[in-house]
């Protein structure tokens, strides 16, 4: 089992109940139930609603993943689960489920970091990750630039958002423009019909900021600038060019993300960049990242959209790599940690 | 039969193994750690005390509350996934019923009584029982003062009764759910063949969700 372990991964850090099964770096199943519709009318994820949905989706997703993979639970060699970061109550459901599987089946349990799993998932599509690799993770919950010498044990955060996550900014701007939640896909869609006509601010790119926050991001000022611009139009009684605003906003986000990611590659001598997180499904981000990587001689690795958003396969992918590398598993007492630092690839036990 | 029962609806995590005739082993954990950290090790401990592995279990029972949601879910998801992995049946037990059975069996009460547990937010989970420990109504979540007068003036067991002595004038032991009595309740329910609860948690409260439908202005007038 050491070379090609059969690993089941569980992800419940936000509103997706994901159960994935991999053998080595081969994806066998990726089952997902989402409670996103139940949150839509609140304009954001309601933690208790998400936790209740995880509880009810857990066994059906485990069943579906086993059926899709054509394996029985008793065939599984190891269990991996997102131990953090994420919504505390939501994480707990997944961690408890993973412990129940580990204990019932008598197999090892790995409590892993959600962000590391976003990086590891690329192995399921493009084969083993080069070392080191640069990772840009952007979603509704995170915006991080990571230098990754070893995805199972050595992840160095270079920068992160200082306020809103990129995906959060998409949601908030979508609301300003009267587009549905979650905002990302809708902004991407209407941007296709718009022109990049408005110069919105690029957060943390001024000379001073590039010294103090070289690889950090800020999207809060951009979001406010968009809201001000729209309100000014409305107050003047003019129509709001929704597509143009969306396209211009999207351009500002994508410009900063890719600019800093490539700067990080250059300064750290890294020639592979991986994208991950829900915002990595954004078509403009993919296109601009590709252009700029090509120009800089960096190889871009972008998993397909279904692997970029939160899912169980990414957790299984990281768990599988941990088995292959002989990393030690966790205990039945391992904690869920809602603010787990990215430098901890495995859940830290007994430290609290 | 070898039944494993556990409950996470109260401040304790409690588990027991029962062979259909008597209780074989029990374990309870209180502590600063969360139910999520305590439950699986407690289950492992009670099975090792019983001298059996998980594959020897033939039936599962879980306390479905009512109780604080986060802890309750840890128990219910653990039970559901264990039942799936071991391919064995699972039943739910109203956690208040386990406290009631213990109260009657240990002669803490000798007539009609109620069970009241801590629901936080200055409320209790409460249900009333006859002298034999048969529940007379669905559990409710109420402010102590809103519990019917004849109910709260009857003998009251459970931690909720002890928290509000002005309303529950005759509080008695036990205070928390015991895995052993939960197991005993489940064994009796299975034997009697009466309609069994599934593992749906008794939340009794809707999720707190603040809808934010109106857009906030960022420009000051
Ligand atoms: Zn994520």
Image (cartoon, rainbow, N blue to C red):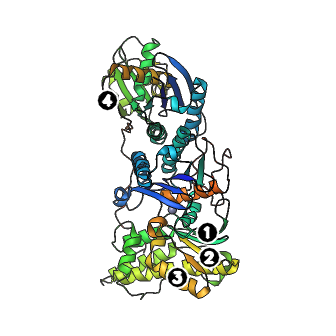
Q: Are marks 3 and 2 in contact (CB under 8 Å)?
A: no
The verdict on label 3 being within 8 Å of ligand 1 is no
Q: CA distance from mark 4 to mark 2?
A: 60 Å
Mark 3, residue position: A290
> Of callouts 3 and 2, which one flags the residue occurring earlier in the amino acid sequence?
2
Please report the residue visible at 59 percent of the width from the left and 61 percent of the height from the top. A116
Residue assigned mark 4: B138
Q: Is mark 1 within 8 Å of ligand 1?
A: no
Disc 2: CA contacts within 10 A as few (<14), some (14-19) or many (>=20): many
Distance between the Cα atoms at labels 3 and 4? 61 Å
Q: CA distance from mark 1 to mark 4?
A: 56 Å
Q: Nearer the viewer, mark 3 or mark 4?
A: 3
Dot 1 falls on a residue whose secondary structure is loop
Observer able to see residue B108 = no
A124 or A258, which lies in front?
Answer: A124
Q: Which class describes the residues within 10 Å of circle 4: few (<14), some (14-19), or many (20+)?
A: few
**Residue B191 visible somewhere in the drawing:** yes
Instruction: Name the front one of labels 2 and 1.
Output: 1
Q: Nearer the viewer, residue B140 or B162?
A: B140
Please say if B110 is above or below A351.
above
Which residue position holds label 1? A129
Residue A120 position within the rendered picture, expressed as x and y whole percent measured from the top left: 57, 63
Is label 4 or label 2 in front? 2
Which dot marks residue A272? Answer: 2
């Amino acid at each position: 089992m050491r070379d090609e372990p059969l690993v089941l991964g569980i992800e419940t850090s936000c509103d997706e109940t994901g159960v994935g099964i991999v053998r080595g770096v081969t994806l066998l199943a990726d089952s997902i139930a989402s409670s996103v519709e139940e949150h839509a009318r609140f304009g954001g994820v309601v933690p208790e609603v998400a936790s209740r949905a995880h509880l009810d989706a857990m066994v059906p997703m485990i069943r579906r993943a086993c059926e899709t993979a054509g394996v029985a639970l008793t065939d599984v060699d190891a269990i991996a689960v997102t131990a953090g970061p994420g919504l505390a109550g939501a994480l707990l459901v997944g961690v408890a489920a993973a412990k129940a599987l580990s204990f019932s089946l008598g197999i090892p349990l790995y409590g892993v970091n959600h962000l590391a799993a976003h990086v590891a998932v690329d192995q399921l599509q493009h084969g083993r990750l080069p070392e080191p690799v640069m990772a840009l993770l952007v979603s509704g919950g995170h915006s991080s630039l990571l230098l990754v010498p070893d995805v199972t044990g050595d992840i160095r955060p270079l920068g992160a958002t200082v306020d809103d996550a990129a995906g959060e900014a998409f949601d908030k701007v979508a609301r300003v423009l009267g587009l549905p939640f979650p905002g990302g896909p809708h902004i991407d869609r209407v941007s296709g019909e718009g022109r990049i006509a408005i110069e919105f601010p690029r957060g943390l790119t001024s000379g001073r900021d590039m010294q103090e926050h070289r690889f950090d991001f800020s999207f809060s000022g951009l979001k406010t600038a968009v809201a001000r611009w729209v309100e000014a139009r409305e107050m003047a009684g003019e129509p709001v060019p929704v597509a143009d605003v969306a396209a211009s906003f999207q351009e500002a986000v994508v410009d900063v993300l890719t600019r800093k990611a490539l700067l990080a590659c250059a300064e750290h001598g890294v020639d592979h960049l991986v994208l991950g997180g829900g915002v990595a499904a954004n078509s403009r981000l993919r296109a601009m990242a590709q252009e700029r990587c090509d120009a800089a001689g960096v190889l871009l690795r972008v998993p397909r959209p279904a692997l970029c958003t939160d899912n169980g396969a990414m957790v299984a992918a990281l768990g599988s790599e941990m088995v292959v590398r002989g990393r030690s598993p966790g205990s039945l007492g391992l904690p869920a940690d809602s603010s787990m630092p990215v430098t901890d690839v495995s859940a830290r036990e007994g430290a609290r | 039969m070898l039944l494993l029962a556990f409950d996470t609806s109260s401040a304790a995590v409690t588990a027991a193994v029962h062979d259909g005739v008597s209780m074989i082993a029990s374990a309870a954990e209180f502590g600063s750690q969360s139910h999520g950290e305590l439950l699986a090790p407690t289950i492992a401990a009670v099975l090792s005390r019983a001298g059996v592995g998980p594959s020897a279990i033939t039936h599962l029972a879980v306390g479905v509350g009512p109780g604080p949601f986060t802890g309750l879910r840890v128990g219910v998801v653990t039970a559901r996934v264990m039942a799936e992995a071991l391919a064995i049946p699972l039943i739910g037990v109203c956690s208040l019923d386990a406290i009631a059975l213990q109260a009657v069996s240990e002669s803490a009460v000798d007539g009609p009584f109620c069970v009241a547990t801590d629901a936080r937010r200055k409320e209790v989970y409460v249900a009333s029982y006859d002298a034999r420990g048969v529940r007379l109504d669905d559990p409710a979540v109420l402010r102590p003062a809103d519990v019917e007068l004849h109910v709260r003036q009857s003998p009251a067991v459970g931690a909720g009764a002890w928290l509000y002595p002005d309303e529950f004038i005759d509080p008695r032991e036990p205070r928390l759910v015991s895995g052993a009595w939960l197991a005993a309740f489940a064994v009796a329910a299975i034997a009697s063949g009466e309609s069994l609860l599934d593992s749906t948690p008794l939340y009794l409260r809707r999720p707190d969700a603040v809808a934010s439908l109106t857009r906030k202005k960022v420009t000051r007038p």
